[in-house]
Every structure is written in C-alpha cells, then in structure tokens.
C-alpha cells in the first residue's frame, strides 16, 4: 500500500492541513506521485478557474487506471492476495478473486470489448447487478479508455433510454436479472424496453447470464457473454492522458433531467485512493466492506477504484442488509473477518429498528472502523452504530461528499479525529470549505449558511457531459470563485462542520438522490394532471420520504385509483426508487409571484404542521394555503 503522507495524530492533521493550503500545488504534486504509477509525468499540476468553470489536473501526464488498480499489485508480488470477495444475495453464495484473477478477467473483457469494436472514448452502458462482472467491466473500460456509465438497477427503461441517448452509448452490458432480497428485477426486459422506445446509438447488448435458472429472450442485437468472452490472454494496457474521461454517472439536480457527471482518469484515481487511505486508514492485511451498489458514486469510488488502487481487499455484496435476516451484514463481517465497514444511515436505521439481538449474537470482533455516507445521520442512529455494532471501540467516520466531488471532502480520519454524533468534523487536507451567509459573504469562525468549496481538488467533476454551460451555471454561478455544493452547513467554534442537508430541490430517499423536477415532469404526463409538486418529508427510516401534491383537471376524479396510476407512472418513467409514499390531491399550489413553488410551505402542510408556516408574504395567492389545509385534513 502506498503511504504518501503521515497523519497519525490530530496535531499531524493540523500541520498537514495548513501545509496543504499554503503549498497547495506542491501538496497535490506529492500526493499524486505517491498514490499512483504514472507512465509520463505532468507538465503542470493543475489549471483551474472557477470564474469560467474550468478544472483540469496533472496536465499532459499519462497513466492507465486499470493498471493502477490491478496490474501493479500483481507486479509488486501481490498476485495471490485477495482483491475482491463477492457475496451473493443468498447466504453461502460467494466467489473470491485474487489480484492475478482480477487481472485475467479484466484482460478477457478488454479483449472482448475491442473485438466488438469498442474504442477509446466510446461510451458503454452498464446496467447490471452488484456482481464481479460489473466491477471487471468497469476496469476493462478504464483499461482501453472507453467511458463507462453505470445505471443503477432500480431505474426504469425510460431512465435507461434517456441516459444512453444523452451519452450516445454504443454498447450496453446487462444481465438477465437479479434478486435483491426476495425481489426479482428483470434487467434484460428493461433494456429491451429502453431500446424499443429508442436508443439509436446502441449497436449491441451484451448479456451476462447471471442467474442461470432465468431465461432471457434473445434479440438480434444481443450477444451472450459466455460466447463473446475468450480464454485469458494478456492485454497490454495503453497509456491514457490524465484528463481523458473515465466515466459518466448520472445524478439528479434541482432542475431538468439528471446530469451526466463526468470524471477523468488521473485526478479521480489520485483523489479516491488518497481519501480512502486517509479516512479509513486501512492496513495491508485488512478486509474492507462497502455495502454500496456500484450503480452509485460510493460504489465507484469506495467499493472499486479507491480500495483497489490502494491494494486493499474489497468485499462486494449483491443483496440488501436485512436479507434473509437482520444479521446478514454482521454474518458477512464474521465470515470474512471484515475490519472496516462502510454503509448508509438508512441501512443503519433499518437494522436498528429490528433490535439489538440480530447484532449482538454475532461476534464482529474484527471490526475496527465504521463508516457512514449519503445522507445526514441522526445522533440516535450514530450512537446505535457506535455502541451496539461497534461496541464503543470503533471510530465512526461520517463522510460528507457528493457524486460531483468524486471522493470524501469532509470527514473524521479513523482513530485520529475526535468524533461527535451527526458531525462530519473536518475537511481533508487540500480541501477548503467556506460557509456563505444570505448576503453572500464568507463567514469567519462559527456560523451557518451555504457550504461551498473555495478551491479545486483532483477528484472534482470536470463537466456535465455534453453541456458545459450547465456545469458553470449549476456549480459556479451562484457564489463566484467557489464550487457550490447545494448543501447547507454549520461550522462550530472548533471548525467542525455539521451538514444540514440540501438547500435546493434535491431529495434524498434512503440516501438515493432524486430531483423534484424529474418526478413532477413524470406526473404531469398523466392526462388528468394539471401540475404537481414533489417534496421530501422527514421519515424515521429512509431519512426523507417522497410526497407529491397533485392538482387535477377540473372534473377529473381525485380517487385512490388515480393515485395508484400516478405512482405506476412515476415508477415507469423514473424507476421504483422514486415511488411516492403519499399523494395529496389539492386545488392549487403555493407559488411566488414569479411562479416558483414554495416547497418549504408544502413540507409543513404535508405533515399537518399548520402553526408556523414562516414568511408567506411573497405568495401570489395566499388563499391557496387554506384550501390546501382543508384538503390534507380531509384526506383519507
Ligand atoms: O446532501 C448531501 C448528502 O448527499 C448529497 C450527495 O448525494 P450523492 O451525489 O448521491 O452522493 C452520495 C454519496 C456521497 C450531498 O449533497 N450527503 C452525503 N454524505 C452526507 C450527506 N449529508 C450528510 N452527511 C453526510 N455524511
């Protein structure tokens, strides 16, 4: 494992942090040299300008991402070390791959992709379960310079179609389907439907027969993985530029359709390996288990790229935390002697709600560090994680970051930074957060406001695929000279950051990110609907739950059947993960005079909190409030 900077105490951290900002270029120059194997050095560390929205790192340098994650560990004599432990949905289903075996699988896929005519720069869609073939396909794309775009299995045919068309993918790799818990998801049928609606750039669909008991209907463009993949032959990893694209991952924002967040090779891998090492402090013999799906950024950065670049054994789990019992994560932990566990607050709250017994009956003695990510963790869940799961001996790292940031920006360093429930604590060296108040001024000392990042770091997204203007408008326009995160935060007198959650129209349900606009535009496709407003309402387990306020056309029935039809429509257009928990039929929506929906008011009305609606003086039609109140009070 590479060790680029030594931080073993809070004093070390403070010293390195100061140095990282004072000698920023030198700092990132050192980190990149130590983390990765570069084939050609950079001519310049970075060239970034937030006033124009331009970000690039390690200019002119060359490397191969797959070689860094796999080949170099084989060359360093670690070929027989376990690289990937895969745990299937059903207990007892397991496969282990050494670095040598991963190397061989990645070479086989790289050859197969090339034989299918996939070249550097081509886009490849991956709509797959959390299985080893997905990890290896990502690495194979990285190896040949193809740009992967993974789509989470919870998204619908329509979502696949819009993503594949947006990036112009040539090939989709999918599988016949997947069990997540007891639920069967027919991935292949969703891909067929996406293509039937129209994916003109897709030439082939490569199908992995993952569950052999399930048949799939073979179309003309379909290829069978088992027929396409040939026996192992070494594959020479070509050199790519640091700024060559590595992947596009779609994520929801405040407005419009999900954006294709673009990450590039050198900076992303430098930052994910650096932050993985610093935050989790893995040792060479450690087993590290991130429960995320590779369809999300956490899977990309901290299930695959970060740990493998660091030569750490990574565990990949296909199923859900409570299947078949609430002990599953702890059984996997014991079976594979997991030292570091990284999961999401929703999983922690779900398991906590099922009681201590499923946890305490397992040993968990190998656990040393516990991580959390994706949404604010409430102090109660934090304490349960710390005391019941970690028996008060494992530090909790509450890691704050985003799809756009590529890696963790604010987090305790395991065993080094003092922690408090619900506090993301301190920025990683090299990261300069600021808090901006309502008048647009950066606060000094403690205070609360918009969280921005004042200077670039290597893992920062490079653009919105195909839409440079959107990149600038979304992230750099509002607070000139800063990257705008969309989150609110509070900084205390000891410089600790407390993340308050999104300040924009992004909702987090079970840590999954959804934009209100995409849900509302799906809803209004129904011929009975005039307009709608989506909001997130507090939920004890999922953090937020989706509520939808719907205005129907005059004469249209406000019936449970219509509510059901709207839920079906949203599941079809966006995916099952966007299912509303509650639909409120209302006669109108609270809007400002410029037509903006005042969601803050709807959030209160949804839970019948009528007493303090805050400032309603900017409402175009204040009388609508009484009408909505009446509607929610009388709803069944
Ligand atoms: O609101 C923050 C929340 O998740 C958002 C980013 O979502 P996404 O791009 O899907 O990435 C999730 C995985 C990194 C952020 O803007 N968020 C993420 N981590 C935390 C968090 N909120 C509070 N505490 C966290 N640790």
Image: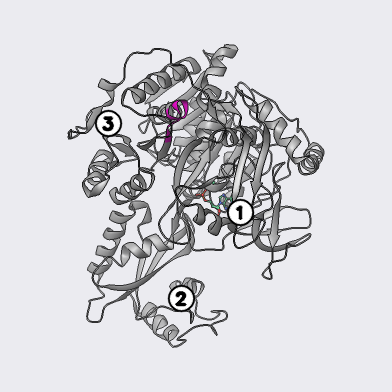
Q: Residue at x 59, y 25 (%)?
A: 286
Residue 156's place in the image compared with 395, above or below, is: below
Q: Earlier in the sequence, mark 1 or mark 2?
A: 1
Label 2 neighbourhood size at 10 Å, few (<14), some (14-19), many (20+)? Answer: many
Does ligand 1 reach within 8 Å of label 3's beta carbon? no
Q: Please provide percent x and percent y for residue 128.
A: 35, 36
Label 3 or label 1, whichever lies nearer to me, is: 1
Disc 1 and disc 2 in contact, CB within 8 angstroms: no
Marks 3,2: beta carbons within 8 A: no
Give the residue displayed 56% in from the left and 79% down from the top.
Answer: 612
Residue 360 visible in the displayed image? no
Q: Is mark 1 within 8 Å of ligand 1?
A: no
C-alpha separation, residue under disc 3 versus residue under disc 2? 47 Å
On the picture, is 14 further left or further right than 197? right
Q: Give the mark count.
A: 3
Residue identifier under label 2: 605
Look at 35% across and 57% down and name the residue there. Answer: 579
- Residue position marked by numbered label 1 in the rendering: 52
| Residues packed near mark 3 inside 10 Å, few (<14), some (14 to 19) or many (20 plus) | many
Q: For mark 3, what is the residue?
A: 207
Closer to the chain start, of discs 3 and 1, is: 1
Queried whether the magenta region covers residue 225, the answer comes back as: no
Q: Which residues are magenta?
A: 141-147
Q: Earlier in the sequence, mark 3 or mark 2?
A: 3
Q: CA distance from mark 1 to mark 2?
A: 41 Å
Callout 3: SS: strand
Alpha-carbon span between mark 3 and mark 1: 42 Å
| In-front residue for pair 413/124 | 124
Q: Confirm whether residue 153 shows in the render.
A: yes
The image position of residue 537, as x and y in percent, is 47, 65
């Amino acid at each position: 494992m590479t060790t680029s900077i030594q931080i073993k105490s809070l004093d070390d951290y403070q010293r390195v942090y100061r140095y990282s900002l004072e000698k920023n270029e030198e700092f990132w120059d050192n980190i990149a040299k130590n983390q990765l194997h570069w084939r050609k050095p950079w001519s310049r560390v970075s060239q970034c300008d937030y006033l124009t929205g331009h970000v690039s790192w390690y200019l002119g340098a060359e490397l191969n991402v797959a070689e860094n994650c796999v080949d170099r560990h084989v060359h360093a004599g670690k070929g027989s070390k376990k690289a990937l432990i895969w745990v299937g949905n059903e207990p007892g289903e397991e496969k282990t791959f050494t670095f040598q075996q991963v190397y061989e699988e990645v070479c086989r896929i790289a050859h197969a992709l090339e034989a299918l005519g996939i070249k550097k720069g081509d886009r490849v869609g991956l709509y797959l379960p959390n299985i080893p073939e997905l990890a290896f396909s990502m690495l194979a794309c990285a190896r040949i310079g193809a740009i992967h775009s993974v789509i989470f299995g919870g998204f619908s045919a329509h979502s696949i179609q819009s993503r594949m068309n947006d990036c112009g993918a040539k090939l989709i790799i999918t599988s016949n389907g997947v069990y997540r818990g007891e639920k069967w998801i027919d991935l292949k049928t969703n891909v067929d439907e996406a293509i039937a609606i129209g994916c003109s750039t897709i030439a082939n669909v490569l199908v992995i027969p993952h569950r052999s008991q399930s048949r799939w209907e073979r179309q003309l463009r379909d290829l069978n993985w088992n027929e396409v993949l040939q026996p192992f032959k070494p594959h020479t990893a070509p050199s790519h530029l640091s700024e060559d694209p590595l992947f596009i991952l779609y994520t929801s924002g405040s407005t419009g359709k999900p954006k294709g967040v673009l990450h590039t090779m050198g900076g992303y891998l430098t930052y994910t390996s650096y932050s993985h090492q610093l935050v989790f402090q893995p040792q060479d013999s450690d087993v590290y288990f991130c429960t995320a799906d590779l369809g999300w950024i956490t899977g990309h950065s901290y299930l695959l790229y970060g740990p493998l670049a660091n030569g750490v054994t990574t565990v990949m789990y296909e199923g859900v935390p409570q299947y078949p019992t609430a002990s599953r994560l702890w059984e996997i932990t014991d079976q594979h002697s997991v030292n570091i566990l990284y999961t999401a607050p929703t999983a922690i709250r779900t398991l906590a709600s099922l009681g201590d017994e499923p946890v305490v009956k397992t040993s968990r003695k190998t656990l040393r560090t516990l991580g959390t990510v994706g949404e604010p963790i409430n102090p109660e869940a934090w304490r349960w994680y710390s005391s019941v799961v970690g028996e008060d001996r494992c530090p909790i790292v509450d890691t704050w970051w985003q799809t756009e940031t590529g890696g963790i920006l604010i987090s305790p360093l395991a065993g080094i930074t003092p922690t408090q429930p619900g506090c993301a604590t301190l920025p990683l060296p090299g990261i300069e957060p600021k808090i901006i108040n309502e008048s647009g001024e950066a606060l000094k000392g403690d205070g609360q406001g918009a969280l921005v990042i004042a200077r670039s770091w290597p893992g920062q997204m490079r653009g919105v695929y195909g839409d440079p203007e959107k990149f600038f408008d979304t992230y750099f326009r509002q607070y000139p000279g800063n990257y705008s995160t969309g989150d609110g935060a509070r900084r205390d007198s000891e410089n600790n950051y407390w993340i308050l959650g999104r300040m924009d129209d992004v909702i987090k349900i079970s840590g999954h990110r959804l934009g209100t606009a995409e849900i509302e535009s799906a809803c209004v496709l129904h011929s009975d609907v005039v307009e709608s407003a989506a909001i997130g309402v507090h939920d004890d387990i999922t953090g937020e739950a989706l509520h939808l306020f719907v205005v129907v056309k005059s004469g249209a029935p406000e019936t449970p059947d219509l509510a059901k039809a709207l839920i079906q429509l949203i599941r079809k257009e966006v995916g099952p993960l966007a299912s509303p928990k509650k639909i409120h039929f209302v006669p109108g929506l609270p809007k400002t005079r410029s037509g903006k929906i005042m969601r803050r008011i709807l959030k209160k009305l949804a839970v019948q909190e009528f007493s303090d609606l805050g400032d309603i003086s900017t409402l175009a039609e204040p009388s609508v409030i009484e009408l909505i109140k009446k509607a929610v009070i009388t709803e069944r």
